[in-house]
Image (spheres, rainbow, N blue to C red):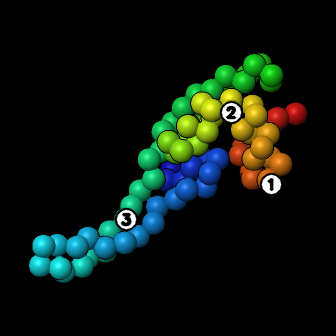
Amino acid sequence: MSRVCQLTGKRPISGNNVSHSNRKTRRRFLPNLQKKRFYIPELDKWVTLKISSKALRNINKLGIYAYLKRLEGKGVDTGVKLS
């Protein structure tokens, strides 16, 4: 399974490990992903999403349905049918 947030699209990025002697070796920075189950009362169904902690904070702030509607308006494919 890929390490990509279903809602924000965050994915791993690459950078350098820098040692004390200033040698640089390549490394990956992985997003903080959580597998979370949400209940959407407007649709009366449960959905399981693999989301970043930033998306989880937005869901806590706006609510799952409002956040998914906002993403749908922007044209983001979330994998959740809202109609």
Residue at x 68% of width, y 29% of height: 63
Q: Mark 1, residues whose alpha carbon is within 10 Å: few (<14), some, or many (≥20)?
A: few
Q: Disc 1 marks which amino acid? A: Gly
Quarter of image, res 36: top right
Q: Disc 2 marks which amino acid? A: Leu
Quarter of image, res 75: bottom right
Q: Mark 3, residues whose alpha carbon is within 10 Å: few (<14), some, or many (≥20)?
A: few
What is the number of callouts on the image?
3
Viewer-nearest residue: 36 or 61: 61
Question: Outermost residue toward the right?
Answer: 83
Q: Disc 1 on helix, strand or loop?
A: loop
Residue receiving disc 3: 28
Q: Is residue 72 visible?
A: yes
Image: 76 above or below 49: below
The label nearer to you, 2 versus 3, is 2
> Which numbered circle lies on residue 75?
1
Residue at x 58% of width, y 42% of height: 55
Quarter of image, res 14: bottom left
Answer with mark 2 or mark 3, whichever residue precedes in sequence: 3
Q: CA distance from mark 1 to mark 3?
A: 28 Å
Image: 21 above or below 69: below
Answer with mark 1 or mark 2, whichever residue precedes in sequence: 2
Answer with mark 1 or mark 3, whichever residue precedes in sequence: 3
Q: Quadrant of the C terminus?
A: top right
Q: Disc 3 marks which amino acid? A: Arg
